[in-house]
Image (tube, rainbow, N blue to C red):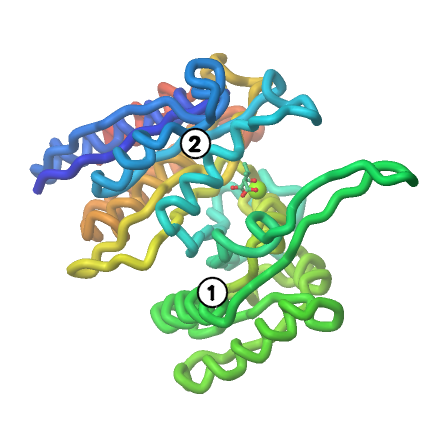
Amino acid sequence: MEFTIAVLPGDGIGPEVVGEGVRLLEAVGKKFGHRFHFDYAIVGGGAIDKYGTPLLDETLEMCKSCDAVLFGAAGGPKWDAPGAKVRPEQGLLALRKGLGLYANLRPVKVYPMLMTSSTLKPEALLGTDILVVRELTGGLYFGRPKRRWETSRGRRAVDTMSYSEGEIKRILMVGFKLALGRRKRLTSVDKANILETSRLWREIATETAKDYPDVALEHLLVDTCAMQLVSRPASFDVIVTENTFGDILTDEAAVLAGSMGMLPSASLGEKEKDGRIFGLYEPVHGSAPDIAGKDRANPIATVLSVAMMLRYSLGLGKEAESVERAVEGILEEGYRTQDIASKGARLVGTREMGELIAARI
Ligand code: IPM
Ligand code: MG
């Protein structure tokens, strides 16, 4: 088959890890007889420097015309001034919103051979395999009003947490459906003791559960969830939550996997054709400017994001599995980038790790 992928390397370590993602797709194409075309564009801080905006309209249109998007990272100290009018991260938000990517899937899997990389005890981590489903186009990130102004008593700012029934229902349905294909447990995370949006969320979760009698639904307050993620991680299956809670909880969950460099993500839209959903794929980690250009970044999060792309957007499940097996194989052989290295590891850089994985396809 033939596919066109929009490639948006972005800032910091983005270009390095995305380069390995592209290398991997080429290896998959060669092995399984597919052809991948790559359409590149500049986004984030690089686009601010070049065009004065983090995302050009034509880049958004280009993405729409592709089968899927591979994204690296956006941001860096250069564009971080508190008063800055445009920010690299706005490019990513505009992409998510502009492409209607409301469902963010962030699997958190603990590889047995990496258990010692985590600061948590191995016995607590054993068997941890969580899928966080984060709502991605609503909540505090996009709610209006959102602004800052001067008052006679000093500066003031407001953000708005807002959700419609439709927005809540569709993300919960994604969670329930995915739970059906897994261990059939869904944890809906909210702050229903305080927030109106959360009370609506909880009500709709309970209603939606009636359509999925085989899935066991539990409600959990976000603060409790934050605690239980580290005290009983192995007992979670699918977690579904709103935008900001999901952002925070998935950084916390990265500790379980040993490193942010291990966590992939898929951001999916509504359009489904022949079991294929348009999506954007990106590592959960950010641009890591401190190690950019040093061949030190872990490309596995991007490589595993490519596996998700193969599965969800390209309908290539077998190919996705071969990528996941290649990653496991390389880890079993003891190869490690610096973020997951322990004593006696075979330390490799970004490029070598990418090459090793691609060679195993
Ligand atoms: C993430 C990141 C982004 C977010 C930033 C870079 C806009 O933290 O994908 O988790 O907050 O969604
Ligand atoms: Mg985040």
Q: Is residue 281 above or below residue 239?
A: above
Position of residue 321 relative to residue 4, above or below, is: below
Residue drawn at x 65%, y 54% is: 160
Residue at image coords 48%, 14%: 49
Q: Identify the image quadrant of the N terminus.
A: top left
Q: Viewer-proximal residue, 105 or 207?
A: 207
Quarter location, residue 199: bottom right
Q: Give residue 120's position: percent from left, percent from top.
A: 66, 48
Q: Position of residue 129 (x, y in %)?
A: 48, 58
Query: Image height check: is 191 above or below 209?
Result: above
> Real-space Cα distance between discs 2 and 1?
44 Å
Specify whether residue 17 is in view: yes
Q: Residues within 10 Å of mark 1 (few under 14, many from 20)?
A: some
2 or 131, which lies in front?
Answer: 2
Of label 2 and label 1, which has the lower sequence position? 1
Camera-side mark, 2 or 1: 1
Count up the numbered dots: 2
Q: Residue furthest right?
A: 153
Which residue was labeled with disc 1? 167
Q: What number is the disc on residue 334?
A: 2
In the rendered image, the vertical position of residue 27 relative to residue 146, given as above or below: above
Q: State left or right for residue 7 relative to residue 36.
A: right
Residue at image location 66% in from the left, 62% down from the top:
225
| Contact between labelled residues 1 and 2, with CB atoms less than 8 Å apart | no
Q: Amino acid at mark 1?
A: Glu
Say whether residue 60 is left or right of residue 339: left
Which quadrant of the figure contains the C terminus?
A: top left
| Residue drawn at 73 percent across, 39 percent down | 148
Displayed quadrant of residue 3: top left
Check disc 2 and give the amino acid type.
Gly
